[in-house]
Image: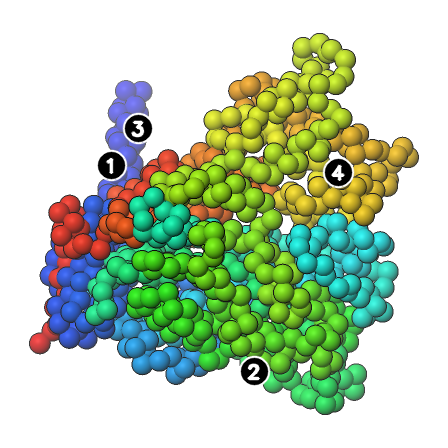
Amino acid sequence: MASVIKWLARLIGGVIVLGLIGVALIYFLLSRSLPEYYKELAVDGLLAPVEIVRNNANIPHILGENDADSFYGLGYVHAQDRLWQMVISRRTVQGRLSEVFGRRTIEVDKALRRLDLYGAAQKSVSSQDIPTLEALEAYADGVNARLAEINEGALGRGAPEMFIFNNPISPWQPADSIAIIKLMGVQLSAHLHNEVLRARLSLALDDPARLNDIQPDDPGHAIAALPRYASLFPSLKGKNVFSVAKAEDVFSPFKTPAFAGASNAWAAAPSRSASGGTLLANDPHLGFSAPGVWYLARVQLESGGVIGGTIPGVPAIMTGRNDRLGWAITSSYLDDQDVFIEKLNPNNPSQYLTPEGYKPFVTERSIIRIKDENPVTLTRRWTENGPVLPGSFKNLADITPVGHVASVSWTILSPSDTTMSAAIGLMKSHTVDQAIVAGEEFVGPSQNLTVVGPSRIAMKVIGAMPNRSPESESKGRIPGRGWIAENRWNGMMPYASNPEFFNPEGGIIGNTNNKTTDKPFPDHVSFIWGDTQRVHRWERLMQGREVHTRDSFIEAQLDTVSFTARSLLPLVGADLWFTGESASEGTPERRRQKALELLSAWNGEMNEHLPEPLIYSAWLRALQERLIRDDLGPLANEFKHVKPIFIERVYRDIDGASIWCDIKQSLPVETCSDVARLALDDALIWLSERYGTSLESLRWGDAHQAIHAHQALGEVPVLRYFVNIRQSTSGGDNTLMRGRTSGTGKDPFNNVHGAGYRGVYDFADPDSSVFITATGQSGHFLSRYYDDLAQLWRRGEYVPMSLAPELARAAAVGVTVLTPKE
């Protein structure tokens, strides 16, 4: 027996030793790709030495003697820190994810291949101006220099993920950078989804007024009546069976409107600034990930230093400042997409109807290679309106009659896209006027560009705006008949027609994705906007001070008071506050009374440490579900987030909207007060099952966890604890410090979309400007810089934003010198 125990101990000891050796070997291989920041390296393609000084936040200050060498340095540092992210972004837009991840991403690849964004990017290279071409080529050379260094030095394939998903990396090309901007356009798009959803709702709802309830127009200028979708396609009349959309893969860039991009930006003129200089704040909102979308960098150009947020793969400071100008971006929600229903020739399905008669589709075969499987051949088709999309994409089959197909017109499909030239021109601008002129080359995704100089402020919508006919039958709000000339685009509107605001009288300018113009169609910009709520709180904060400071702008960026909660709770609970008989402890009635007591004393602050935000959020979510489920059936799944204007219309009974409160499938006639009470009980039951029965111990931050997940490894057992970043956060769907909730699953209030970058610039003292990102500079999960900025971001802290090289050198964590090879 003793010998058995002895041998068993030896066996267990041997397994442990082998395990430790295995772990050590894995760590060694993975750590080989950790960048070395202190070094001198001779590389091909440089004209003169480039010094890269990384300050104590690991932000590279790239000091080249000419523009080309500085862009070379930017490409090199992007590839040092974010190579995997760049490669996956490129594969996504190329429609080549399945080569790495297998069949799970085949639908994503098919959709991107049909759009052929990468082909459009390749064609767009020749449309760039000479400085931009030089920047693109130099940047690509810098990326490729890092790839050569990895190959020659056996540096762990450049990133840990490369060991798990081992595929060759092709050299970086100028078209790759243009394609990544187009990919951002996909991630920020919302209008195609909204058009299809509006058509589906039109088919499902008997009363057109109810469509205006659930898909309300933003407050403002009246909108002309649209035809019922069924009147355009009578064969769809009476259709009430709709497909249920599959959840998008984590690698899919196609987002629902709830996650189609948002942002805040505001500026103050010297007359409204305590320092006497202009002020600018910006926090673009995108989906959270680890690493994050943004990468901070400072680039020395011949025109001066530039610092701010970059996107790995793109050689430009997308939001930031130089010594004389600051610029900020917010999603404009310009309507840059239209879905067209194309009629097939019944005698020849290879043709479709145009205003001039039937014409053949332009077709092309494309081969998609799939890991460990046989390749798939895809036949792509184009009409004069744009690429043809399958019925499975965004539920297009639900609104496409038999004998028809759907196509899409979209500005980012342009084969002569000069957005990159606009971005390079913007970062070299030194005056507000120069920046606005540079914006004319911007095609998409459309943005509100807010710019400040030493004494002037301005905002301009940049991006190509489709020129639609005033006689368009759908006005871009629902899919139109593609063979009717009046429905088609007639090129683009002149840049001068894009809304602009210069030096407003009040000295404050800003945007929270709210409506920016009341121009009638077709100069309207959009019928759908990204915000009807945050703007009210922003106006209150901006008007509450005679003059502003950098700190007051920071305070506004971090504000967590919900205008939505303050405006809706008095309506929804109007007949419930302080009513009802006394109830015993532990009864549902008592819990309801306690919840109402807490909410009645709450100021609407979505603070992570409070219970009220969680009670409020659960109540409104349950309320909307009760209001819409019996009317919409499966279509109710499209509304995963509370629609404040819908709730307001119902509880103010605007145009008879209170009819939503009556549950059609029940015999009694329910009032809105009945539904509010029932929904509160639903919410309290859910809260007790999920978080316990003590209302006072609830904590919003337990439910509102910011989830920065690694795309490829975030779901892998054990490993996910190393690669994902999870934090308790304040804010909510409709606060200025926006923390958009997931809306689905067992944790519907997880924070998955928000400000991955924040910057505040004071031009009275530019070096006092500050910025922060949500994770860290490195994409290597073994690096100390993978998540070192995350806690600062969570606490609402910032790091300095200086163009001074000596300040970067004073606390440098690395100095790299790139020298030309002889």
Q: Nearer the viewer, mark 4 or mark 2?
A: 4
**Model colouring:** rainbow
Q: Quadrant of the N terminus?
A: top left
Between marks 4 and 2, how big is the CA–CA gap? Answer: 53 Å
Mark 4 or 2, nearer chain start: 2
Write down the residue under mark 4. 651
- Residue 482 is left or right of residue 119, and the answer is right
Write down the residue under mark 3. 8
Q: Are marks 4 and 3 in contact (CB under 8 Å)?
A: no
Residue 401 horizontal/vertical position (percent): 78, 70
Residue 521, quarter of the rendered image: bottom right
| Neighbours of disc 2 within 10 Å: few (<14), some (14-19), many (20+) | few
Amino acid at the residue labelled 2: Glu
Mark 1 or 3, nearer chain start: 3
Give SS at disc 3: helix
Write down the residue under mark 2. 364
Q: Quadrant of the C terminus?
A: bottom left
Residue 100 horizontal/vertical position (percent): 43, 62
Between marks 1 and 4, how big is the CA–CA gap? Answer: 68 Å
Residue 431 horizontal/vertical position (percent): 33, 66
Mark 4 or 3, nearer chain start: 3
Residue 549, quarter of the rendered image: top left
Mark 1 or 4, nearer chain start: 1
Q: Are marks 4 and 2 in contact (CB under 8 Å)?
A: no
Q: Nearer the viewer, mark 1 or mark 4?
A: 4
Between marks 4 and 3, how big is the CA–CA gap? Answer: 72 Å
Write down the residue under mark 1. 17
Q: Nearer the viewer, mark 2 or mark 1?
A: 2
Amino acid at the residue labelled 3: Leu
